[in-house]
Amino acid sequence: MANYDYDLFVIGAGSGGVRAARTAAATGARVAVAEDRYLGGTCVNVGCVPKKLYSYAAHFHDAFEDSAGFGWTIPQAPTFDWATLRDNKIEEIKRLNGIYSRLLDGVGVTLINGRAKVVDANAVEINGDRVTAEKILVAVGGWPWTPEFEGSEHTINSNQVFDLDSFPKRFLVLGGGYIAVEFASIFNGLGADTSLIYRGELFLRGFDREVREFTRDEMVKKGVDLHFKTNIERIRKVESGLEVTLTSGEQFEVDAVLAATGRRPHLEGLGLEALGVELNTDGTLKVNERYESSVPSILGLGDVTGGPELTPVALAEAMHLVQHHFTQNEGGKTPAPLDYQNIATAVFCHPNIGTVGLSEEEARERFEAVRIYSADFRPMKHTLSGSDERCLMKLVVDDESDRVVGAHMVGDDAGETIQGIAIAVRARLTKSDFDATVGIHPTAAEEFVTMRSVTRR
Ligand code: NDP
């Protein structure tokens, strides 16, 4: 057997790479990780974690307003200081980076600071050294992508938006995906005049139609200025900001434009092309159920492979990959392929969206007959707050089997609620099981077990 420097060389210390490195090392494998930017990858540094912190910050806006009906007087109008939020966030991320470093260190993983290049099926080059490994894991994630138009260089992307020097009082977001709606809600909540520009007829393509419409209406009520069926034609820098012209002819002057127009695999300069490693048509790394690329010693997982771009998916893939490639060597069982069905997600726009399983539209295509149960109501909190925010809950049921095949919510903490419902949907429970479950009162979540009348078939 060839004598390699390592059993596993991981390129990229994001969620998936770190989990694979730690888990493989725990089986006794000799593991190194190369990272040229920051420990924890997108999620910890410029994604889920700082985004959620900023979303908390933005929620205070509503909380201050809601408090009056409950008897609170706030003597002065609250003011928001961007630098405090940003700098506290920076400190928290530093703390998390430290935890990641200690986690790797604690299981004996060698951490190398630098960008690795794969030079053959079992070797990488890093900082001028050639290092060999039985397996190389490409876990380099994705990178924000911005379309080119006149003045597109004046946009910022989701890597840059967290650390702006000053707070953009007039903020414009381009795009209609997760990042666009989340940041439109965040900057709106923090007090910016916020607009969202989306080329399609309604944002959040792929989500349940009713959820998308409901979210649109709630975001408008909160003051986000939505523009659909248009795009940015050009951006010009003017003395007092950025002048944005849309294809519809409308013009805005803003302080910052966030391009939230998708992410691409971060494969440049990695050397995979020269080795003939196959890619998918969208440029992501092609892997099989064992996370092997067309060169079997080169593995891949997470965003770079083009699956659902979600941290928990990368973590689950890492666990599977280690079972396939390391635990089995110790007599472990061959794991079943990872189940990509019914992965719950949340969109942290305001109010939040939580969703699992099929949309109504997908269910109608897949099943002969479906029953839809939906409730659109004013949450109890807002009877006193006076806020006109509403909450949507929805179950999609296959009529023949009575199975709940989709659950959707738009409302406070929707992600928290849907996480529990996701277990029931994954376990293929029926509407009768939901009905037989006694609710928790008073909660919004109890609606999921008390909806009895069919809204439509
Ligand atoms: P998405 O792929 O979700 O959305 C990209 C958006 O940009 C789409 O609305 C797309 O429009 C639009 N777009 C693409 N190209 C152009 C163009 N040339 N001109 C104008 N608009 C364009 O990407 P995001 O950047 O929002 O997020 C990336 C991924 O990160 C998500 O898919 C998600 O998996 C993950 N993520 C998850 C979060 C969570 O779990 N809460 C939070 C943030 C990100 P169209 O719909 O017409 O194609």
Image (tube, rainbow, N blue to C red):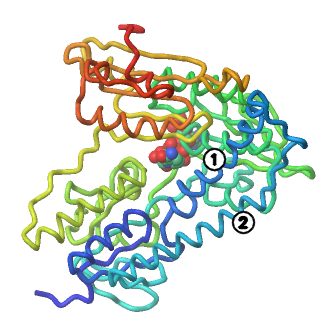
Q: Amino acid type of disc 1? A: Ser
Q: Position of residue 66 (x, y in %)?
A: 73, 32
Measured from the top left, where is residue 156 in percent x and y? Answer: 69, 55
In the image, residue 260 sits, relative to residue 210, either above or below, namely below
- Residue 23 versus residue 47: which sits nearer the camera? 23
Q: Which x, y percent locates residue 141?
A: 44, 61
Tell which of 150 and 338 is nearer to you.
338
- Location of the C terminus by quadrant is top left
The kind of residue tagged 2 is Asp
Residue furthest to the right: 239
- Residues at discs 1 and 2 in contact (Cβ within 8 Å): no
Find the distance from the CA under tag 1 to the CA under tag 2. 15 Å
Image point (43%, 71%), residue name: 13
Disc 2 on helix, strand or loop? helix
Check disc 1 and report its element: helix, strand or loop: helix
Could you tell me residue 346's position as x and y percent?
48, 40
Please tell me which residue is depicted at 46% across the width and 63% down the height of the picture. 266
Q: Residue at x 53, y 38 (%)?
A: 413
Residue annotated with mark 1: 55
231 relative to 307, above or below: above
Residue at the (74%, 35%) spot, across then down: 246
The quarter of the picture where residue 138 lies is bottom left
Most foreground residue, 49 or 30? 49
In the rendered structure, which disc, 1 or 2, sits on the residue that comes first in sequence? Answer: 1
Q: Check mark 2 vs ligand 1: CB closer than 8 Å? yes or no.
A: no
Image position of 134 (left or right of 37): left
Q: Which residue is mark 2?
A: 87
Q: Is residue 308 above or below residue 205?
A: below
Q: Dot 1 surroundings within 10 Å: few (below 14), some, or many (20 or more)? A: many
**Which residue occupies the foreground of this view, 180 or 333?**
333
Q: Residues within 10 Å of mark 2 (few under 14, many from 20)?
A: few
Which quadrant, please, contains the N terminus? bottom left
